[in-house]
Amino acid sequence: MSQDLISGVGEEEANEDLFDHLPDSLLLLIFNRLQDVKSLGRCCAVSKRFNSVALQVDSVVVRVDCVISEADGGPASKPRSLFSNLFKLLLGSFFKPLQVLQQILGPKKVILAEVSHHSPVEVLKNFGEIRSLRIELPAGELGEDGGGFLKWKAEFGSSLDSCVILGATSFTRKTETDVIANYQENDGQGSIPESFCTNGGLKLRVVWTITSLIAASARHYLLQPIVADHPTLESLVLTDADGQGMLCMEKDQLAEFRRAPVAASTSSNRTQVPALNMKLWYAPRLELGSGHVMEGATLVAIRPVDRPIRKESDGFITSAFEEPFGEAVKAMVKRKTYLLEMNPF
């Protein structure tokens, strides 16, 4: 009889859910480390308690698997044109756990609306405590073929605050046979050659600048419902899988975005780009300490005309990119500066 009792106790302990002994605060800390919205969705499907706690996380990452083409209803072969269908997103297996959860909790307790599961607006709407949000798109909008390289980072409030663009006609690793001139020894006196303006070099840089600004303003415009639905947000990053472009909004910028109306462009669904002051730096060839070489390296720093760039070493320029690109920016700003202006569009 004593053996049966011991066996019964052992069996009861074996079937015991040890998560029940964890306080909600510790469980929430674990869920906050997950961040990925798909993983959180699966946690929501485990139990009512997990569902209740997981939806209180303050840090979420949404990784978009692919973009749905409006023309054929299927995944686009090259997810480049994100302006018109950015929010038609397929989040893979995330929706299935939520359907299971609906069956568990009944029809009145729905995590996502069935007809809107492609939209991050709907995916995120039941997460009521988000402070930090990162959305990653499949790829950058600006396809750079033939070894070209382009990165941009933009900060927004209700409109553009600043933008930094770093590009090159090629970005390769140095080989043993390379003979590279050290342009940094010119102490910032390098000038743009006359051929730059006649062989299409300047035109290419203008295209880089305009398309980067259009990409940033389109992303900004489409963030309005997410920002409106989450008043607790203090940090928002919208980027892409290949790290080409990054839109950032911090606490004060998000507050401005909520209270000030967004000036939309008349031509498309994007925020209007204001009149801009720009500084441009150019290096025909730039060697980096990482062993990479940038051909036709170009750096463009942009701000609205009412917020001028006071110094080449302004933090928004020198801290825009991580290494090795941060090194490239610091080398570029020592070179000769060219000033440009752009009308609103």
Image (spheres, rainbow, N blue to C red):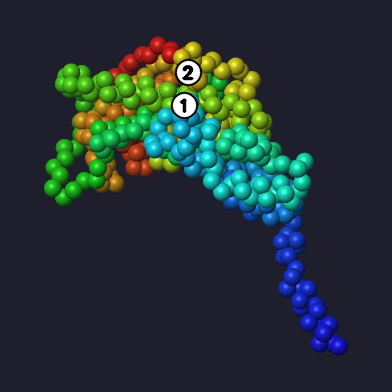
User: If you read the primary sequence from the N terminus, does the residue marked by circle 1 or circle 2 appear first?
Assistant: 1
**What's the mark number on residue 129?**
none
Residue 113, given in percent of the width and then of the height, sits at: 67, 37
Q: Give the SS element for disc 1.
A: loop
**Residue drawn at x 42%, y 29% as measured from the top left:** 81
- Is 326 or 127 nearer to us in this picture? 127
Local crowd size for mark 2, using a 10 Å CA cut-off: few (<14), some (14–19), many (≥20) = few
Instruction: Give the distance between the C-alpha atoms of the residues marked 1 and 2, in whole angstroms.
Output: 9 Å
- Near mark 1 (Cα within 10 A), the count class, few <14, some 14-19 or many ≥20, is some
Q: Is residue 243 visible?
A: no
Quadrant of the rendering where the C terminus is positioned = top left
Across and down, in percent, residue 107 comes to: 76, 43
Q: In this orientation, does residue 110 appear?
A: yes
Place of residue 22 in the rendered image (x, y in percent of width and height, measured from the top left): 73, 60
Q: Which residue is mark 2?
A: 268
Q: In front here: 242 or 316?
A: 242
Name the residue rendered at 59%, 51% in the picture: 39
Q: Where is 293 relative to 255, above or below?
A: below
Residue depicted at 61% across the width and 45% down the height: 95
Disc 2 residue type (three-letter): Ser
Q: Residue at x 40, y 32 (%)?
A: 80
The N terminus lies in quadrant: bottom right
Q: Amino acid at mark 1?
A: Phe
**Position of residue 265 measured from the top left corner of the image (x, y, whole percent):** 49, 15
Front residue of 278/167: it is 167
Does the residue at mark 1 contact the one at mark 2 (Cβ under 8 Å)? yes
Residue matched to label 1: 83
Secondary structure at badge 2 equals: loop
